[in-house]
């Protein structure tokens, strides 16, 4: 008998809600939105569900504060977290968010033992590690989102500079999110033509810098973190898994010897399919890229060493 897929989105804040709505529009499955705040996931879910007749989607969207309602999910998306408050250091926030992610993943994974987990909560590389520990799932069934968003920003700016459709631009980023990101210009192309043949070095440098600061640029404008493009990025990963698409997407994946690294989650190109991260792809680095990737790995190891997971 056909059974509709079930998707749990934990965190009914800006990104969780944007993600849930897009998932519904794309009819990827029934959606359960969970949050610790009473009423918010229920209200947002009801509002989204009521857009169904207008948008023409038949999936159901429900909201809850109880993990029992998320049982037997095929995929769990984690967006729960706290924004940084005045007087709070980055390390304080790291510990608070790690505790939140550990708690919510522990509860959700218990009732959905066969799910794949995709983590967005920041810092996502570290939180993916925490989520794997909390769930005890095989490493390939736990991943994080950062690179799809970073490369979407990269593609947006490249396409604008080239005056072409974003659809014809592919771009590659690796490593950690934000400052630690490693945009690989050599592996980025427009209509199959490497972008360094189409744009001069100064323009490319500007685009790379803007991409690295992409999250901060949005935050600076409206004083809250981005959520539309992060939501879209999560949905692309969810779709790749639920439909077993075998997409090659930059994914925060567990490294077990790949790129010479062990016991760490970091952004690398990976094949995403029904089993989760089906394979990590290894690409050659120039010495500068290798150095940037090493720094990126360090930017994940340092915060991880402050946590006791
Ligand atoms: N269980 C469930 N939900 C929780 C918990 C918890 N223990 N703790 C916090 N939340 C919820 C909050 O109630 C809030 O609704 O997580 C939601 C976070 O939403 P926002 O504050 O709007 O944050 P958002 O912009 O969606 O970002 C979420 O993604 O990009 C990262 O750094 C960002 O870690 C943050 C996360």
Image (cartoon, rainbow, N blue to C red):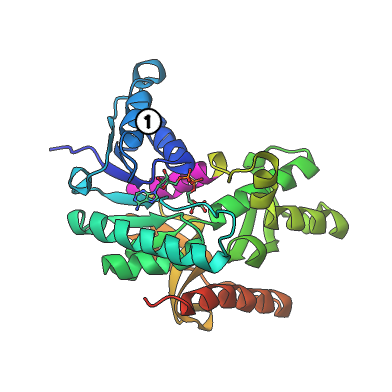
* Dominant SS type (magenta): helix
- Where residue 6 sits: x, y (%)? 26, 42
Q: Is 76 colored magenta in this rendering?
A: no
Is 291 above or below relative to 34?
below
Q: Secondary structure at mark 1?
A: helix
- Where residue 82 sits: x, y (%)? 47, 52
Q: Is 217 left, or right, of 274 in this rendering?
A: right
Extent of the magenta region: 230-242
Is 90 above or below relative to 211?
below
Location of residue 299 by image quarter: bottom right
- Identify the residue at the far top of this view: 54
Q: Residue at x 61, y 53 (%)?
A: 151
Instruction: State whether label 1 is within 8 Å of ligand 1.
Output: no
Q: Residue at x 20, y 42 (%)?
A: 69
- In the picture of the structure, the residue carrying the numbered disc 1 is 44
Q: Residue at x 78, y 38 (%)?
A: 163
Around disc 1, counting alpha carbons within 10 Å, would you say few (fewer than 14), some (14 to 19), or many (20 or more)?
many
Quadrant of the image containing the N terminus: top left
- Where residue 139 sits: x, y (%)? 34, 69
| Number of numbered discs overlaid on the protein picture | 1
Query: Residue 243, can we see it?
Result: no
**Nearer to me, 213 or 150:** 213
Quadrant of the image containing the C terminus: bottom left
Q: Residue at x 52, y 51 (%)?
A: 83
Q: Is 197 left, or right, of 84 in this rendering?
A: right
- Where residue 100 sits: x, y (%)? 37, 58
Q: Is 233 colored magenta in this rendering?
A: yes
Location of residue 70 by image quarter: top left
- Identify the residue at the far left of this view: 1
Query: Residue 91, can we see it?
Result: yes
């Amino acid at each position: 008998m056909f059974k509709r897929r079930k998707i749990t989105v934990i965190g009914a804040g800006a990104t969780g809600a944007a993600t849930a709505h897009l998932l519904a529009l794309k009819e990827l499955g029934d959606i359960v939105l969970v949050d610790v705040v009473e009423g918010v996931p229920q209200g947002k879910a009801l509002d989204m569900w009521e857009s169904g007749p207008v948008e023409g989607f038949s999936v159901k969207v429900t909201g809850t504060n109880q993990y029992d309602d998320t049982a037997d999910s095929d995929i769990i998306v984690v967006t729960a977290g706290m924004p940084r408050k005045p007087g709070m250091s980055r390390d304080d926030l790291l510990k608070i968010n790690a505790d939140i992610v550990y708690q919510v993943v522990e509860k959700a994974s218990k009732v959905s033992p066969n799910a794949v987990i995709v983590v967005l909560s920041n810092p996502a590389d570290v939180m993916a590690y925490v989520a794997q520990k909390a769930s005890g799932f095989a490493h390939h069934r736990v991943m994080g989102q950062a690179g799809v968003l970073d490369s979407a920003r990269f593609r947006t700016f490249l396409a604008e500079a080239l005056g072409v459709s974003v659809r014809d631009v592919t771009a590659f980023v690796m490593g950690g999110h934000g400052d630690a990101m490693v945009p690989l210009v050599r592996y980025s192309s427009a209509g199959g033509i490497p972008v360094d043949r189409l744009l001069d070095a100064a323009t490319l440098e500007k685009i790379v810098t803007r991409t690295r600061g992409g999250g901060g640029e949005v935050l600076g404008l409206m004083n809250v973190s981005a959520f539309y493009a992060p939501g879209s990025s999560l949905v692309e990963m969810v779709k790749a898994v639920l439909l077993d698409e075998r997409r090659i997407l930059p994914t925060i994946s567990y490294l077990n010897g790949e790129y010479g690294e062990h016991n760490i989650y970091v952004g690398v190109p990976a094949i995403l399919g029904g089993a989760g991260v089906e394979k990590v792809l290894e690409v050659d680095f120039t010495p500068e890229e290798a150095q940037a990737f090493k720094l990126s790995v360090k930017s994940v190891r340092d915060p991880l060493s402050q946590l006791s997971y």
